[in-house]
Amino acid sequence: MINHKYILGILFLLFAAGVIFYSSYAGLIIIFSLIIFGALSSYWKERDLKLLALASIVLLALLNMGLNGMKFGIDFSGGTRIPVILESPASQSTMNEMVDIIKKRASTFGLTEVKVRAVGESQINVEVPSGDPALIDSVEGLLSHQGVFQGVVDGHTALSGDAILPGTIQSVPSGYLSRGSDWGVQFSVTREGAEHFASTAEGKANYPLYMYLDRPSNAIVLLSWEEASSEVEVKDRQLVSSAFSKALELEDENITAYILDELEISELEPRSNETKAIVSQSLEPEVGQELEGQGFELMVVDDEEIAPAITQTGTGEFIVSEWKAVGLLSSPVLNPSVTVGTPNYGYVISGGAEGTGSQKQMDAYEKSKSIESILKGGALPIQISTGSKTTIPAPLGKEFLNLSMIGIFIALVAISIFVSLRYRKTNILLPIIAISVSELLILLSILGSFTIDLAAMAGIIAAIGVGVDAQIVITDELMKKNQGSKQDRLEKAFDIITTNVTVAIFAMVPLLFSGMVEVIGFAISTIMGSLLGLLISRPAYAALVEDIAED
């Protein structure tokens, strides 16, 4: 009889691999293989199934490495340094807090290596691998945000980032989002935060909840009528201006929006010498110099960010639903059920994505992960800006990587020879080497799709070491011929291995959720190696050596 738990384990791993490599041709082959494997599994003998599963995954791992290559960390391939400049010097405790916040934001990338180091009192260096331009752009985007979240109802702050519980922040699957939304991030708030929202939103049914991230203070917005009306069908200046005023109203921190063809720049006066004037790149050459002459601090944004998205609600009112230039993420309308004064603890930020098809899905994914990481990290206590990127050399280099791989293979051969001599069976040598090399290739393929740094390499070595230990357990039990049937001895061996894997996984879970980027790679590689061994490579090894041990 075929062990159906084993089949499910293989299908799960194949499905996980398909998800990881979905963007490549390898992903399509993996998913196709999953279907074929599931359809034909009932016709195979259990021993053949075990060996075929391992061989298939090894071939897929080689295919993935051949098509997509492998990504190596800063220690092996060098990196890019992004300096974060603090607006004012920070104390040691504040600097530690800021480094910790940036690390938490970076931990969203999982296995991807991001190093964060404080330099003096006014600078933090963030280093990422040079071989991943998309990662560099993502990290720059994260660092450009202060991380201050505000939910505004009728000109009053109803929600703030301080009330968000970091452990509850997570992306929302697209199937659970409201119509018109492509991405979403949900979170829960503290009791005080829920009560404050309830009191602020009471009686405000069908009012928009303006959700801001890094809403500028002491600022004005200047835009042309073409920019102001580009995202609205009804070209009514009064309706547009009214929508602007309601969206930008906030107690003593109102932002005023001006349409340039309705005023003269000379009529504007800054509130202070730090008042910002937000304009698009297209308008900057036309009005920038004059604004600076009036005493404004110029803040130039991309053309696509200056244009607000304006929608019409079910009541016929026009509201600003998204405005990147001022940090407005979305403006959901309050359901009457949440405006009766009863505290509500769960909220969702949502929005739209750009592009079509897979490009739109990728944009939605990147936006949700960016918002999620910023909210998890929290607000930075000091204003920041990013400096010019520089390239940094690899402290260890490719030669060290080559030596590491040579060292792993020499260690495998040495251990295998030792084990084969211990049992005085040289024909055990080949199965031990084959299984260990198979585990190495699979782990390198999966981890290499993200980043292989020193921590991940240490996890791979640890996983292979645990694998050899498990092979010894299986061989020892199979050779105890006077202690039950072969099946009973194998079950006993796998009981021991399952216990070891369980202990290893539980030991790594605290590191996985510690928020320390430096050890996440080690934790995940160890967990993946343990599961890979339990479900795939250990059963395959048992199938190879059970007859040898019996002889």
Image: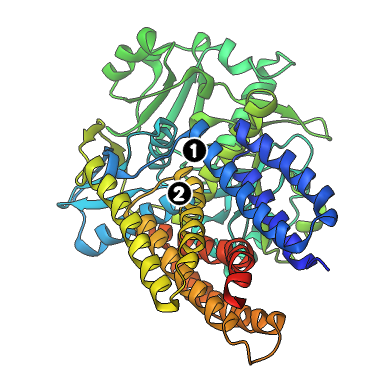
Q: Which residue is mark 1?
A: 65
Q: Which residue is mark 2?
A: 444
- Given the current orientation, which residue lies at the most extreme left position? 120
Q: Is residue 470 above or below residue 97?
A: below
**Is residue 325 shown left or right of residue 188?**
left
- The residue tagged with tag 1: helix, strand or loop? helix
x 57%, y 82%: residue: 479
Q: Is residue 403 above or below residue 417?
A: above
Q: What x and y, as percent, mark residue 458?
A: 35, 61
Q: Which mark is residue 215?
A: none
x 25%, y 34%: residue: 387
Q: What x and y, as percent, mark residue 75?
A: 26, 47
Colour setup of the view: rainbow
Of the residues shown, which amino acid type is indicated by label 1?
Answer: Met
The part of the image, by quadrant, that contains residue 487 is bottom right
The part of the image, by quadrant, that contains residue 82 is top left
- Given the current orientation, which residue lies at the most extreme front position? 551
- The residue tagged with tag 2: helix, strand or loop? helix
Q: Is residue 150 visible?
A: yes
Q: What x and y, as percent, mark residue 222?
A: 47, 20
Q: What x and y, as percent, mark residue 466?
A: 45, 70
The quarter of the picture where the N terminus appears is: bottom right
